[in-house]
Amino acid sequence: QVQVVESGGGLVQAGGSLTLSCTVSGLPTDDYAMGWFRQPLDKEREAVSCITWTGDRTYYADSVKGRFTFSRHNANNTMYLQMNSLKIEDTAMYYCAATRLCSVFMTAVQTLSTSDEENYWGPGTQVTVSS
């Protein structure tokens, strides 16, 4: 059984930092790219970042480039999203996902589903940035 669990969310002031963690079990993560997407209340999903399964390339949304850093550690199936210089508009539920292609994840995350074996994600962790 595949399990994806996110943690590390919370309430932080604008300009502050948070580190989100993600652990994956029951999945050969070296066969999957790993990504983070977020979904603000009453809005669509937005891809945040994605690392290829080889780890040789990392993608970032323009809105977080230079502020967020995504790292993966295949040895223990753990991923981290370091978020610095947080803004109020970063407030959202953040989800860690295993996916097949970063190119699809970054451009069409709204269309992805967990109904097949191509994508998995967890229950999410809430990040709230206050003024």
Image: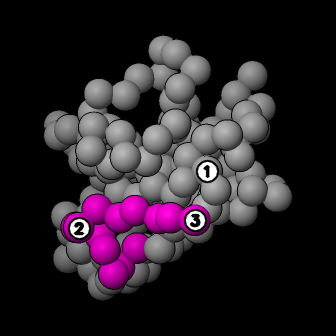
The magenta-colored residue range is 56-68
Which element carries disc 3, helix, strand or loop?
Answer: loop
Upstream in sequence: badge 2 or badge 1: 1
Label 1: how many Cα within 10 Å (few below 14, some 14–19, many 20+): many
Residue shown at the point (37%, 28%) measured from the top left: 112
**What whole-number distance in Å separates the C-alpha atoms at marks 2 and 1?**
21 Å
Q: Percent x, y for residue 83?
A: 43, 73
Q: Is residue 127 left or right of residue 19?
A: left
**What whole-number distance in Å separates the C-alpha atoms at marks 1 and 3?**
8 Å
Where does label 3 land, which residue? 56
Three-letter amino acid code at the position of disc 1: Trp
Where does label 2 land, which residue? 62
**What whole-number distance in Å separates the C-alpha atoms at marks 2 and 3?**
19 Å
Which element carries disc 2, helix, strand or loop?
Answer: loop
Three-letter amino acid code at the position of disc 3: Asp
> Does the rendering let one see residue 125?
no
Q: Percent x, y for residue 95?
A: 45, 45
Upstream in sequence: badge 2 or badge 3: 3
Q: Which mark is residue 53?
A: 1
Label 2 or label 1, whichever lies nearer to me, is 1
Q: Is residue 95 left or right of residue 26?
A: left
Label 2 or label 3, whichever lies nearer to me, is 3
Which element carries disc 1, helix, strand or loop?
Answer: loop
Judge whether 32 appears above or below 69 on screen: above
